Structures are given as structure tokens and as C-alpha cells.
Image (cartoon, rainbow, N blue to C red):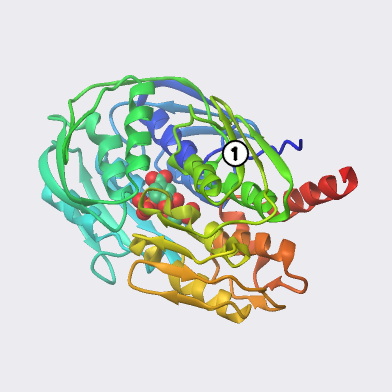
Amino acid sequence: MTDVAIPGSKSLTARALFLAACADGTSVLHRPLWSDDTEAFAAGLAALGYAVDVRPDRCTVRGGAAGPPAPGAEVFCRDAGTAARFLPTLGALGHGVFRFDGSEQLRRRPLGPLVGALAALGVDVRAEEREGHLPVTVHAAGLKGGALTLDAGLSSQFLTGLLLAAPLMAEGLEVTVTDLVSVPYVEMTLAMMRRFGVEATRAGDTFTVPPGRYRATEYAVEPDASTASYFLAAAALTGRSVTVPGLGTDALQGDVRFAEVLGRMGVDVTLTADSVTVTGPERLSGVTVNMRDISDTMPTLAAIAPFADGPVRIEDVYNTRVKECDRLDACATNLARLGVRVETGRDWIRVWPGTPREAEIDCRGDHRIAMSFSVTGLRTPGLTLDDPGCVKKTFPEFHQVLASLVREWTQGA
Ligand SMILES: O=C(O)C1=C[C@@H](OP(=O)(O)O)[C@@H](O)[C@H](O)C1
Ligand SMILES: C=C(OP(=O)(O)O)C(=O)O
């Protein structure tokens, strides 16, 4: 059995940083993720005036309930959707002019529902170039809160950004969603808010957060479940075994359910409270699966799908078209390059069994396309990536860790 150490969760690290900034006192995060996204998030907090001390395996943040200490700031979110969708709400709690921008890739991604929600709460917020996109400037004078409706059908991050800040709004917040994707990420938000001392409730489509105070907390970050998917998929594809310690049925991350999808394809899966072990079968079976809740793992599944003995159909993943790239299109185009038969619709992809042939993968600057097709490469001689370095968004050491796992497997065989 081979253990693989997966770095901390991007989503939990971002939430813990935000909550620590809003909590009274000094919080300590253990084993946070340090990658481009979370470094951007921590740098964003520092720009907003918080005292953030970043160490390799821990981070301390001195927070407070009054909003950002800085009287104004320029926050560069790089490629991080979490930073772009969470930090403007934190800025709005303060007093001053806060400007948020990001990379070209992030500027293309939707922000409109969050900008609209802040405006509905009375914030003077302006998109500088294109409506509903970065860069945006927030003229902040504290947030009173109240009730609003929100379309979170393109991203749950709009809702998370509002919920995290809600206890610090004078009247709290009641948000009713007209649509919502990636529900496990919202459950993660509520669970993390509870960890920091605030109880928010959900009744149907309405989320209610009373005004309150977060308390400084010591928090250990779980390994990243989306990152784990590549190593589980690698074992599934090569008939090997891998264990990810620290990630199991107790995890706050919905993407741990990717293991169950592998289970439906004939992979032997053992989930305990705090570990997951998979052993690849002789042959993977085809499957039809709805991935609305776990769509970051859609490319992982699409990339191993040709090796199944029947078609793999992934449904209800429209919002993967507005991630780091149009992921349905990127998966389909790259599978076609590999000579695999593939079909897509507005919100689905179907991949037929095939034998991928040598090709260069067009990563489109998307870490998940690079990591997913690296797994395909384990059974595709000559597969190369045009941009292997884009994995830095969530896992800078990805290629080294995958190579060392494969080395361990071959040496142990
Ligand atoms: O809240 C979060 O931490 C995230 C929510 C999801 O985004 P969407 O809600 O946009 O699907 C996920 O894809 C992203 O990687 C992280
Ligand atoms: C969609 C992703 O990232 P984000 O939205 O946080 O930029 C991702 O990591 O797959």
C-alpha cells in the first residue's frame, strides 16, 4: 500500500484565512495550502491591512470585527476565483476605496451576481471595464446587511463571499438563492463559520446569518480532495493501490465523493473517517454520473474515461465552462487530439472507449487540465503538456509527487 501526502485544501485555506481576518484575536492555521491561489489570498489580506504571518506549515492572522484595517488597497487576485469572489465582500465591510483586479484569465470569469448583491446592500461598487467582471472598485463605508436574492447558478463562490462576511454586517444577512451550484462548498462555508463560532441556518433556498462575532480559532486544514482525485485516478488507471491519509468520510470537502464515482466504475474503494484507499481493477467500467456537486473532478474523470470498457457520460456541469477555461471544451478538444471519440452538449460530455495516442495537451493555463491529462499520460506514451507549470495554481509540486508515486509503484512491483 502506498501513502501519498496531499497538500492542504485550497477552499478550506481560503475560508480559514477570511474567517481569521474577521475573528477577534489571533487565529492559527495548521498545514494550510501554499500555492499561487492561497498566496494571492494571503497577500490580499495583507494588502487590506491584516497582520498575516505565513510559514511553510502554519499561518497566523490577527483579525477583528471592524473590517479591513487599511484605509484603502489594491488587491491583485492573480488566477484565484476564491480571492475574487470572497475578498470584495471583506473590503466592503471597511472604510475606504478598495480595488480588486486579477489575471486576464480571472478577468474573463463572471463576477456579476456578487457585484449586484453588494450594490443591493447599498455598496458603491463599480466594474471598471466590463460589467460583471474584474477590475472592480469598492467604495466602502461598512455594511448594514439585510435581505437579498442571488443567482449562484454559475458559481457558489458568490454566496460564500456574502455568507462569510454576513455576521459582521450590522443587521446580519438573509440570502435567497434563485439557483445554486457546487452545494458542498456552501456546506463547507457554513461548517467553517460554525468552527469560528457563528451559526448560520439554511431553510430551503434561504440562508440566514445573524449578526455576531467570530472568535479566533486554531484550525488544521484537511488535505485537498480535488488534488487527491488525480492520485486516486492514477491508481484506478494502473491497477495499483494508493492511500490518502487525512481525507475520508469526515471531510468537509464534497470532492472526496470522487472516490465513490471510481467505486461505481469497478474500483475497490475503502473510505474510513479519515482516509481513502483505492485499488485499480483489471478493467474500468463505463458510468453515467451527475457531477454538479463535484465539478472540479469532471476533468479527472474525463481524462481516464477512454480506458473504461463502455462510454462515460458526465452530466450537469455547465459551470465548468466558466472556470479557469471552458473545461468541457478543453476536455473534448484534448481527448479528440488523443484520437478518442467524444461528444459534448451544453452541460455534458460523453467519452467512448479508445486507446489514446501520442499528442501534446493544450492546457489553456488550467491546472486541472494539466493534472488530469498527466494521469492519462500514465498509459499514453508520448503524451506531453504545453504548459506543465500551470499546476502552480493549486499544487506546484504536482509533477514531482506523481513521478515519485509511480517510481514507488514500479520499484515495489
Ligand atoms: O468555494 C470554493 O472554494 C470553490 C467552489 C467551487 O467553485 P464554483 O462554486 O464556482 O463551482 C470550486 O470549483 C472551486 O474550485 C472552489
Ligand atoms: C475552479 C477552480 O478554482 P477557483 O474558482 O477557486 O479559481 C478550481 O480550482 O478548479
> Image quadrant of ligand 2?
bottom left
The residue lying at 67 percent from left, 77 percent from top is 360
Which residue, as the protein is rendered here, is positioned at the far right?
411
Label 1 sits on what residue type? Val
Residue 356 located left or right of residue 172: right
Image quadrant in which you'd find residue 376: bottom right
**Residue where numbered disc 1 is placed:** 269
Q: Total of numbered circles in the picture?
A: 1
**Mark 1 lies within 8 Å of ligand 1 (Cβ measured):** no
Q: Position of residue 88 (x, y in %)?
A: 31, 48
**Residue situated in front as seen by the camera: 405 or 379:** 379
The residue lying at 68 percent from left, 48 percent from top is 280
| Res 19 visible | yes
Q: Position of residue 406 (x, y in %)?
A: 79, 51
The residue lying at 47 percent from left, 45 percent from top is 41
The residue lying at 58 percent from left, 77 percent from top is 340
**Relative to 44, residue 198 above or below:** above
